[in-house]
Structure formats: C-alpha cells, structure tokens
C-alpha cells in the first residue's frame, strides 16, 4: 500500500513538473508582477505622463529575472524578448491594468480571492524558473556550484534584485531599499530553493527533480497565499534565522549595547579634567576678590 502511494505521488509530481506554464501560468505571473508595479507610488501618474517608461518598467517586472540570468551566463540580455508571444501577452496585461476603462480589469484581478489564485500560479512559475536556471547553468558549468546557485537565484527573484534600476526608470532613487540588504521572503526563498536544486542537480540530494519541484512549489504557494491573504510581511524563516544567525554570526544589538555601556561607564569613571586657567584669568580673579574685600 505504501509503495502504491509512493508511486502515485511520484506520478503526480512528474505530471505536475511536465505541466506547461504558457499561457495560463505565465499570464498569472505577469498579472501579479504588473499589479505590484501599479502599487508603487507615482506609477499611475507615470503611465499617463510617459507610457513608454511605464511599459519598460512593466517588462522589467515581468522579464527582469531572464535579463539578469543572461548577463550572468554571458548571453544577450534581450534574448528573451525574441519570444514574441510572451512579450505581447505581458504588454496586453500591462495595458489592461493601467488603461482599461473604469479600471474594470484592475478591479477584477486585484479582488482578493482572485488575486490569491494568481499569486499561487505565480509561485508555480517561480519554482520552474529556479529549476530551469540551475539546470541551464549546470550544462555550461558542470562543477560550478556557485554559478548554478547564482543563476537559479536571479531567475527566481530577478525583478527584486533589479528594483533599484527599475526605480531609476520611474525617477526614484532609494538606495536604502536595496534587496540584498533587506531581503524579502521571495528573495530568501529563491536563495534557499536554488541551494536545494543545486544539490539535487549535482546528485548530493537523493530526490528526483520532479518531486523537488512539486514539494517546493507547494511550500511557496502556502506561504505566499497566507502572507497575501493576511497582508503579512513576516518571513516564515525568521524563527530559524533568529536562532541560527546569533550563533554563527553574532548578535549586532548585544554587541552595540555592551560597547555603549562600556563607553558610558568609561565616561563616568573618568570625567574630563577642568580647563586650565591662564595667568591673565588668575590675575583677574585676584583683583576681583580684593575689590570685594575692600567693599
């Protein structure tokens, strides 16, 4: 019975991994990506003033991961734009979200129950892109583990890693929002996921690629749908990171606190010496005392 269940699960994972993502899943990916662009402050005004700049930002949101991956592997960064069907589909979605009369399309796709379906479908595409990036890099660099991980990572979170460049196109410069300094959950999950796919690709993880795609996609869907439904930005990795990071990398807050306390005690125990009075000031003080005595 267990063997039959394992076989059925393996068949389900294989069928899921072979499921085509174009056009339905790609359309959901483009819808969520352009929605996040429209949520940015000033994005609607920019679309009215400069539709081309708005379209270019939308294409970065939709295809930024492919651009970064091609740059890493030494290929043409505009290579993916030769896929006319995907570019036309993304352009149509951008136009409907920004310019549909009475915002009908935007209201439909941003309705929370509908949006949750699109968010789940987007995670299917994200995991496929991570797996494809690692697989592609493995063909060119068979023993380049870090190249595989870098390629899979940017395939899964390329648009977030390009956020500062995309902001420049909108006339905004916020270096403090650097994604590497403040990683969001999708960026961290893509990083951890690409490590798993790299280990699987190099036969260090004894699991099939189809099973890994299936289980990691289910994990991503559950996390992202829950976070979107509850409007939460808390990372599911936070408890584990909060336990591991202080052990291996130290605690920044405690180090600063002890340093500040040491500095404060040092200042209290050793107050600064009073300024030394000059000879003229001493003479002036003597004359004032004699004048008071005379009075």
Image (tube, rainbow, N blue to C red):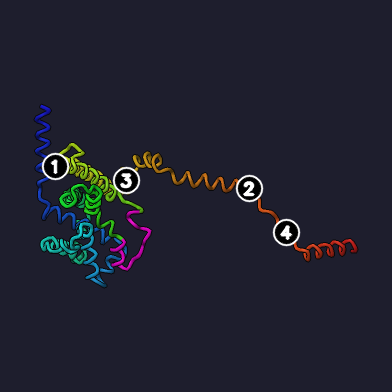
Q: Position of residue 243 (x, y in %)?
A: 37, 39
The residue carrying mark 3 is: 235
Q: Secondary structure at mark 4?
A: loop
User: Which residue is most to the bottom?
Assistant: 49
Tell me the quadrant of the picture where the N terminus can be found. top left
Between marks 1 and 4 in the image, the one whose residue lies nearer the viewer: 4
Q: Secondary structure at mark 3?
A: loop
- The image quadrant of residue 180 is bottom left
First-in-chain label (2 vs 3): 3
Tell whether label 1 touches label 3 (CB within 8 Å). Answer: no
Q: Position of residue 270 (x, y in %)?
A: 65, 48
First-in-chain label (3 vs 1): 1
- Image check: 291 left or right of 37? right
Disc 3 versus disc 4: distance between alpha carbons? Answer: 58 Å
Q: Over which residues does the magenta segment extend?
A: 164-180
Disc 1 versus disc 2: distance between alpha carbons? Answer: 65 Å
On residue 268, which mark appears?
2
Between marks 3 and 4 in the image, the one whose residue lies nearer the viewer: 4
169 in magenta: yes
7 in magenta: no
**Local crowd size for mark 3, using a 10 Å CA cut-off: few (<14), some (14–19), many (≥20):** some
Q: Position of residue 60 (x, y in %)?
A: 23, 62
First-in-chain label (2 vs 4): 2
The residue carrying mark 4 is: 276
First-in-chain label (3 vs 4): 3
Tell me the quadrant of the picture where the C terminus can be found. bottom right
First-in-chain label (1 vs 4): 1
- Image check: 63 left or right of 188? left
């Amino acid at each position: 019975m267990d063997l039959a269940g394992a076989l059925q699960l393996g068949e389900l994972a294989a069928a899921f991994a072979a499921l085509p993502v174009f056009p339905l899943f790609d359309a959901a990916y483009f819808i969520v990506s352009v929605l996040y662009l429209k949520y940015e402050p000033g994005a609607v005004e920019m679309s009215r003033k400069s539709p081309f700049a708005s379209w270019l930002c939308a294409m970065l949101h939709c295809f930024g991961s492919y651009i970064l991956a091609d740059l890493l592997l030494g290929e043409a960064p505009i290579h993916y734009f030769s896929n006319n069907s995907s570019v036309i589909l993304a352009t149509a979605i951008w136009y409907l979200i920004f310019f549909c009369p009475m915002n009908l399309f935007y209201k439909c796709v941003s309705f929370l129950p509908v949006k949750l379906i699109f968010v789940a479908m987007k995670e299917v595409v994200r995991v496929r892109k991570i797996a494809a990036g690692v697989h592609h890099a493995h063909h060119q660099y068979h023993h380049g583990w870090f190249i595989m991980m870098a390629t899979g990572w940017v395939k899964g979170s390329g648009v977030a890693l390009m956020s500062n460049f995309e902001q420049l196109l909108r006339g905004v410069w916020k270096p403090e929002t650097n994604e590497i300094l403040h990683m969001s959950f999708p960026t961290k999950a893509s990083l951890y996921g690409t490590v798993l796919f790299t280990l699987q690709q190099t036969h260090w993880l004894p699991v099939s690629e189809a099973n890994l795609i299936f289980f990691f996609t289910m994990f991503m869907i559950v996390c992202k749908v829950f976070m979107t439904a509850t409007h939460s930005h808390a990372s599911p990795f936070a408890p584990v990171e909060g336990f591991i990071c202080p052990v291996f990398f130290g605690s920044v807050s405690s180090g600063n606190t002890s340093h500040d306390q040491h500095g404060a005690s040092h200042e209290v125990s050793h107050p600064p010496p009073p300024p030394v009075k000059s000879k003229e000031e001493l003479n002036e003080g003597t004359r004032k005392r004699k004048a008071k005595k005379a009075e």
